[in-house]
Image (tube, rainbow, N blue to C red):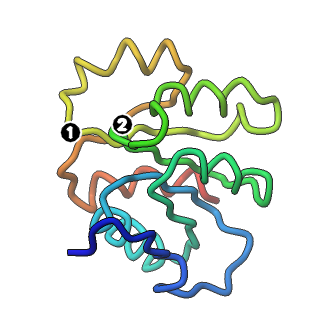
């Protein structure tokens, strides 16, 4: 396991399909890798980062069709990150889905409060990700 190193997953799995279709923010590198490979297998490019602040910077470079944010992002609250994205007129239309190991019942109020578009519970099966593909076409 890699610890305390800023690992650039985007360099590890190269993609020439710019702009990226999906922005994924998760502090767990195996989850980032799994999601990136899943979407790549479906023909979609994604940009992955472990840092919420970095995701905001990337939004100035490209506008994704889907954003996935883990609730346990370390450098900024996922809820604050969602509010920042959803309050910006350039990005508020983008579907934003939380990734969480918390029960949905614990997150539902925050989904409504922050104007997120839903959540996916971890651990997840690939089948639970397939319904996200309709956002990408």
Q: Quadrant of the C terminus?
A: bottom right
Task: Give the class, few, some or many, for how many residues have Cα within 10 Å of label 1's Cα (few <14, many ≥20).
Answer: some
Residue at mark 2? 71
Q: Which residue appears farthest toward the front when viewing the image?
A: 4
Judged from the image, the secondary structure of the residue bearing numbered disc 1 is loop
Tell me the residue at 34%/18% (across/down).
Answer: 108
* 2 or 1: tag closer to the N-terminus: 2
Q: Is residue 108 above or below residue 67?
A: above
Tell me the residue at 48%/77% (across/down).
Answer: 40
Front residue of this view, candidates 121 and 75 = 75
Q: Between marks 2 and 1, how big is the CA–CA gap?
A: 8 Å
Tell me the residue at 20%/75% (across/down).
Answer: 1
Tell me the residue at 53%/45% (across/down).
Answer: 52
Front residue of this view, candidates 31 and 40 = 31
Residue at mark 1? 101
Q: In the visual, does 96 lie left or right of 36?
A: right
């Amino acid at each position: 396991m890699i610890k305390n190193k800023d690992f650039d997953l985007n360099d590890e799995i190269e993609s020439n399909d710019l702009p990226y279709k999906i922005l994924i923010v998760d502090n767990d590198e195996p989850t980032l890798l799994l999601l990136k490979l899943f979407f790549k297998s479906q023909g979609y490019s994604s940009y992955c980062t472990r840092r919420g602040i970095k995701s905001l910077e990337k939004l100035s470079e490209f506008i994704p069709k889907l954003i996935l944010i883990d609730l346990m992002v370390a450098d900024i609250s996922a809820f604050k990150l969602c509010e920042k994205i959803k309050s910006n007129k350039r990005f508020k239309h983008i579907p934003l889905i939380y990734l969480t190991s918390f029960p949905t019942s614990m997150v539902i109020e925050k989904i409504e409060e922050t104007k997120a578009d839903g959540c996916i519970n971890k651990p997840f099966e690939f089948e639970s990700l397939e319904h996200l593909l309709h956002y990408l076409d």
